[in-house]
Amino acid sequence: MKKWILITAILSLPWLFQAQTCQGSSQQDFSSYQPSTSYQGSSFQQVLKVISDANAPLKSKKELDEFAAYKSGQLPHYPVNAMTVFSSSPALLKDAQRTVSERHDYYDYLPKKLHANGVCLIGEWQVDQPSVYSGYFKQGSRGLFIGRASVTMNEIHRGSKRGFGFAEKIFPTLNESEIVKTANFFTVDVMLGTNTDRILETAMTNEPESGFNFSALGLGLRVASTLKKADENPSFRPVTPVAKLNESGSVKNPHWIRVSAARNLVKNDQIDFRSEILQAMKDNPELVFNIDVSDTVSDRKAEGWTRIGSIKIRKALVSYGCDRQLHFAHPRLVD
């Protein structure tokens, strides 16, 4: 039983990408992958321009066609199946090794293999409650924020099993033009999905439930054996980078983090989760996601979580840069 839980837990992690060119560099051949040490950080303004589709470096007909779809107002639905995950290069293992080694905030072209369909959220990270933790978990911490909400696999519409994910990128500054090294972390609710009607009604953690979806087990078997070679425990994503952010003293981080939308938000009945987020931005002055932490429980529905702050979202967008360029570095368990 534990074997099947591991397989399903690994399946939908938001770290499988296909990359061609990283920020500030010439085109790379990831068939002979070498970890990069050239990351010097990014400004919030630079990353915002990427996800706003300002001057996207379009080099092929495929990229031009994809870009045109967003500009026409479409919400593209990229399929996620065995063919899309395994038929493209680079090799899956090298792909996974890159994403736990490279810290770039964006690439010239970066289709996501599993979390292919998403919506970007722009705002501010705020910790307003007392905390025993370091870095950007300290009370008073504020930083610019860019996140990407997504579904873990293929289904995007209400009525189907959807696993909701939220990749988070914190800039340790309120100066939009300051170049800084970002901290990234990841949360998911149930990786193989549930019938939850709205992303604004779920809670996501850094060690999510696996769930069960018989139709996905075949793909999971192929993915699981590969990802274990890139990281010892890919079903758990530590939040150590946040605790290290601008920290000169000792580092202390919570073991688990939970992110969920505030209960008082005006909800809507949009079928596509991306449309749900976009409509909610129109219906609310801002979207607020609570930041809860715990060292004792991982169950997203259990008691034992402590609220320390919030992520306040002022803008959301679906774009080529959000789906095909933005990158969130994956911290290893040992980091």
Image: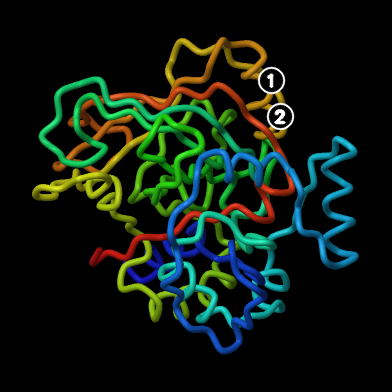
Farthest residue to the front: give it: 178
Q: Position of residue 295 (x, y in %)?
A: 15, 42
The residue depicted at 64 percent of the width and 39 percent of the height is 119
Q: Residues within 10 Å of mark 1 (few under 14, many from 20)?
A: some
Alpha carbon separation for disc pair 1 and 2: 6 Å
Does residue 33 appear in the picture of this structure? yes
Image quarter (top left, top right, bottom left or bottom right) of the C terminus: bottom left
Q: Along the line of sight, which residue is nearer the eye, 292 or 183?
A: 183
Q: Which residue is mark 1?
A: 279
Q: Is residue 255 left or right of residue 2?
A: left
Residue pictured at 67% horizontal, 80% vertical: 89
Tell which of 240 and 176 is nearer to you: 176
Residue 274 placement (x, y as % from top left): 67, 34
Name the kind of residue labelled 2 in the image.
Ser
Q: Is residue 227 above or below residue 282?
A: below
Say which amino acid is labelled 1.
Gln
Q: Are marks 1 and 2 in contact (CB under 8 Å)?
A: yes
On residue 141, the disc is none
Residue 265, position as x, y percentages in the image: 51, 13
Q: Which residue is mark 2?
A: 275
> Which quadrant is home to the N terminus?
bottom left
Label 2, secondary structure: give it: helix
Residue 185 makes an appearance in the image: no
Q: Secondary structure at mark 1?
A: helix
